């Protein structure tokens, strides 16, 4: 019997995408499925959907800040008390660099995961300005080493990396995404469902057929 499969679309700019990334990488439940993480450009999805950023919607801007704190506390996810400044920031360059990592190391998921983790740590915990190439470039060099990090930065400027980010973003939109995190889950029966939002991660687990304890249910309702 094949294992359940979970695809998670991500952009570093989204705090709730960070939560989804952190939980799927660290929680034991997700060791029971094959996880694929896909770098996209959230701004592109928002534009295709004619969607407005949450911070531009009255009351919702305050609500999402409270919600972020609640979920982070519940799942012990590291977060700075305040948003990075400025916020939001343009992550197009960083996301292209992550696509460059995908192209250069297609068979090593851990490298992509480590790069995502370092960028999330820098942005949402250390509040660094990751829109600046010299800042996110250093992050890739810290993770991969000076030479490989420089190669990734050079590759991120290529048509291939830019095209991959666009293709990933188009795929997320075609799968139904209008925001992040966005999950596409396939269970062992081959049944496919999509889910939006960190607060629906319990439904993701249920669809995948992953076995969890009563305590897991309390955390993921």
Image (cartoon, rainbow, N blue to C red):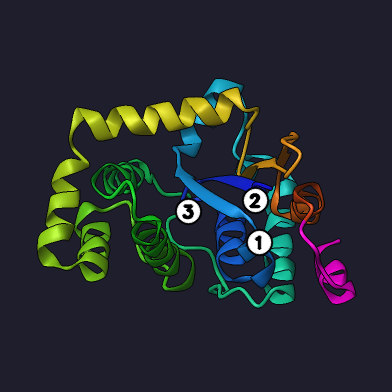
Left/right placement of residue 80 relative to residue 64 reads left
Judged left or right of residue 51, residue 117 is: left
Which stretch did the figure color magenta?
210-221
Q: What x and y, as percent, mark residue 81?
A: 58, 74
Q: Secondary structure at mark 2?
A: loop
The image shows residue 95, relative to residue 81, as above or below, that is: above
Q: Is residue 120 left or right of residue 76?
A: left
Q: Residues within 10 Å of mark 1 (few under 14, many from 20)?
A: some
Can you tell which mark lies on residue 32?
1
Residue 213 in magenta stretch:
yes
| Labelled pair 1, 2 in contact (Cβ < 8 Å) | yes
**Quadrant housing residue 217:** bottom right
Vertical relation: 20 (above or below) 90: below
Q: Earlier in the sequence, mark 3 or mark 1?
A: 1
Residue bearing the label numbered 3: 87
Q: Quadrant of the C terminus?
A: bottom right
Q: Is residue 205 left or right of residue 160?
A: right
Q: Is residue 107 above or below residue 184?
A: below
Residue 180 point in image, percent of width and height: 60, 44
Q: Residue at x 44, y 32 (%)?
A: 168
Find disc 2 in the rendering and name its residue: 3
Task: Tell me residue 213's x, y (percent).
Answer: 85, 72
Pointers 2 and 3 in contact (C-beta within 8 Å): no
Q: Earlier in the sequence, mark 2 or mark 3?
A: 2
User: Is residue 181 something one can see in this rendering?
Assistant: no
Q: Give the Cα distance between marks 2 and 3.
A: 39 Å
């Amino acid at each position: 019997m094949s294992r359940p499969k979970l695809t998670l679309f991500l952009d570093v700019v989204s705090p709730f995408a960070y939560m989804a990334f952190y939980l799927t990488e660290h929680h034991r439940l997700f060791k029971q499925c094959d996880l694929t993480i896909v770098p996209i450009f959230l701004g592109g999805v928002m534009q295709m959907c004619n969607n407005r950023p949450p911070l531009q919607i009255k009351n919702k801007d305050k609500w999402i800040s409270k919600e972020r704190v609640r979920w982070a506390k519940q799942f012990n996810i590291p977060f700075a008390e305040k948003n990075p400044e400025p916020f939001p920031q343009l992550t197009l360059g960083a996301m292209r660099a992550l696509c460059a990592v995908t192209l250069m190391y297609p068979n090593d998921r851990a490298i992509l995961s480590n790069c995502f983790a370092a960028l999330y740590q820098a942005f949402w915990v250390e509040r660094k300005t990751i829109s600046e190439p010299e800042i996110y470039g250093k992050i890739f060099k810290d993770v991969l080493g000076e030479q490989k990090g420089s190669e990734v930065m050079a590759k991120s400027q290529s048509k291939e990396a830019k095209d991959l980010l666009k293709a990933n973003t188009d795929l997320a939109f075609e799968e139904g995404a209008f925001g992040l995190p966005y999950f596409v889950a396939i269970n062992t029966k081959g049944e496919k469902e999509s889910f939006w939002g960190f607060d629906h991660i319990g439904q993701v687990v249920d669809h995948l057929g992953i076995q969890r304890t009563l305590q897991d249910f309390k955390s993921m309702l």
